[in-house]
């Protein structure tokens, strides 16, 4: 698949190195004047906007995808109707539902030995977003919030953390504060609502200046903290709505060949938008695909969901690779848990946190391998069990984030980014 065959060669990171010094100095004014394209500018500036150019895309499978119908198919009774197919990796098979991903398996690291103790949707979703079980006293920040805080995007005028689609119990900035909550995009297929001034830019700017003067005049000591937070929020929002970088949210800017490569549907649009946002300097993007809670009619429903997921996921990895972005962009595919080996009387699979799968690509991950395994029945981990804390230690290590760093809770308790677990060295290049 050659995603960039019909696009300008300047889109490819490796092809613009000779112009990097020139484009580094291109201002937003020159962009507005039409002397440089938006894509030219962001393709060379994104790495300068984030420390080391690191970024992360989470493909979140809301509801808990069946490992048997995706990345750990089994023959025999527990495999049900789903048949394994060969992949680009010798000896590694995927479910027949994932032909596109099977074709790029050498660019993936498949973890088949994930294991946790949480089988409740709400608790497990929070756990797999934070590495912590939910508590009433401490609101732990979600993965995207931590990455946005630890990998600042400097001059990028877009939100650091963007969540595309509906993700339940996925957490927010928590003890890091609302500054690191996700900017939520309900539909990737259209530009977000309410992100343009309701009046002309000059008048809007005058109103902001008046607001600033009023807040300075009323800056009593008792209210200074609240005023500071309020001004910070308005300043960030104003930079965003006035910024030409908002074009990153407009998928109509993409060539038709690229859009076709990702396929159709909300998840496909979300994956394409994720690449555009990362390219523009956003640090973390989460894209959700729901309805994996297949307690009934598991085989047909899983097949339909895989049809929505297979092509966009494969296209995203290939697109990032061709643009020279994959080495610095970590892609993580996972859900809150897996599904039971036994098929219930309704033709479904129930919750099963004891053994399930996750997939990683890019970002310094050692790809072209399957880590861990389950036994023939799929009901036990056979080797290399990996907990949620092990996975998070590895994710943060690949992003060069120190998990020993402590954030302070509202009651003054220091809490590590990840408390426990060990880095899975086999996963790191």
Image (cartoon, rainbow, N blue to C red):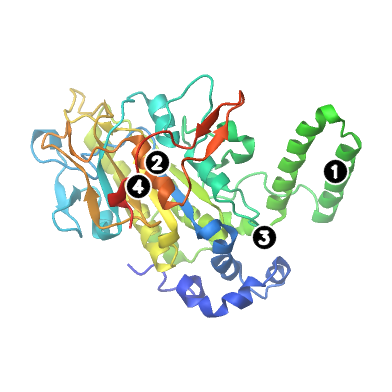
Indicate which disc, 2 or 1, sits on the residue closer to the N terminus.
1
In this figure, which residue is indicated by the disc labeled 3?
Answer: 244
Left or right of 294? Residue 347 is left
Secondary structure of residue under mark 4: helix
In this figure, which residue is indicated by the disc labeled 2?
Answer: 392
| Label 3 packing within 10 angstroms: few (<14), some (14-19), many (20+) | some
* Image label count: 4
Name the mark nearer the viewer: 1 or 4.
1
> Distance from label 3 to label 2 (Cα)?
34 Å
Residue 233, how many percent across, how many down? 71, 41
Indicate which disc, 1 or 3, sits on the residue closer to the N terminus.
1
Q: Residue furthest right?
A: 217
Residue 197, how many percent across, how many down? 75, 49
Tell me if I can see residue 268 in this picture.
Answer: no
In this figure, which residue is indicated by the disc labeled 4?
Answer: 308
Indicate which disc, 4 or 2, sits on the residue closer to the N terminus.
4
């Amino acid at each position: 698949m050659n995603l960039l065959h019909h696009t300008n060669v300047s889109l490819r990171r490796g092809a613009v190195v000779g112009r990097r010094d020139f484009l580094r100095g291109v201002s937003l004014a020159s962009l507005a004047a039409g002397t440089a394209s938006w894509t030219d500018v962001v393709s060379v500036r994104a790495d300068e906007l984030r420390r080391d150019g690191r970024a992360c895309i989470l493909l979140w499978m809301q509801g808990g995808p069946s490992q048997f119908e995706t990345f750990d198919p089994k023959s025999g009774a527990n495999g049900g109707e789903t048949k394994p197919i060969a992949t680009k990796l010798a000896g590694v098979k995927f479910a027949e539902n994932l032909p596109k991903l099977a074709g790029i398996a050498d660019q993936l690291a498949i973890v088949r030995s994930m294991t946790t103790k949480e089988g409740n949707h709400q608790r497990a979703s929070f756990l797999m977003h934070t590495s912590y079980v939910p508590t009433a006293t401490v609101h732990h920040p979600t993965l995207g919030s931590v990455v946005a805080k630890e990998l600042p995007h400097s001059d990028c005028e877009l939100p650091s953390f963007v969540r595309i689609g509906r993700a339940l119990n996925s957490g927010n900035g928590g003890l890091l504060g609302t500054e690191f909550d996700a900017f939520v995009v309900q539909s990737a297929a259209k530009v977000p609502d309410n992100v343009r001034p309701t009046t002309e830019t000059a008048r809007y700017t005058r109103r902001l200046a008046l607001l600033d003067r009023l807040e300075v005049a009323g800056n009593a000591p008792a209210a200074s903290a609240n005023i500071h937070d309020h001004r910070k929020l308005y300043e960030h929002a104003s930079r965003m709505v006035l910024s030409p970088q908002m074009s990153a949210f407009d998928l109509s800017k993409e060539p038709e060949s690229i859009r076709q490569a990702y396929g159709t549907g909300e998840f496909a649009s979300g994956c394409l938008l994720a690449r555009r946002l990362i390219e523009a300097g956003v640090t973390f993007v989460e894209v959700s695909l729901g309805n994996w809670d297949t307690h009934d009619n598991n085989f047909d429903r899983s097949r339909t969901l895989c049809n929505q997921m297979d092509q966009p996921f494969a296209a995203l990895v290939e697109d990032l690779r061709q643009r020279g972005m994959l080495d610095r962009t970590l892609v993580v595919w996972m859900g809150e848990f897996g599904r039971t080996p036994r098929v219930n009387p309704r033709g479904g699979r129930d919750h099963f946190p004891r053994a399930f799968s996750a997939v990683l690509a890019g970002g310094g991950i050692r790809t072209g391998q399957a880590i861990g395994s389950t036994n023939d029945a799929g009901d036990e981990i056979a080797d290399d069990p990996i907990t949620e804390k092990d996975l998070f230690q590895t994710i943060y290590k690949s992003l060069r984030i120190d998990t020993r760093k402590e954030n302070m809770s509202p009651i003054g308790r220091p809490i590590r980014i990840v408390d426990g677990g060990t880095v899975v060295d086999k996963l790191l290049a």
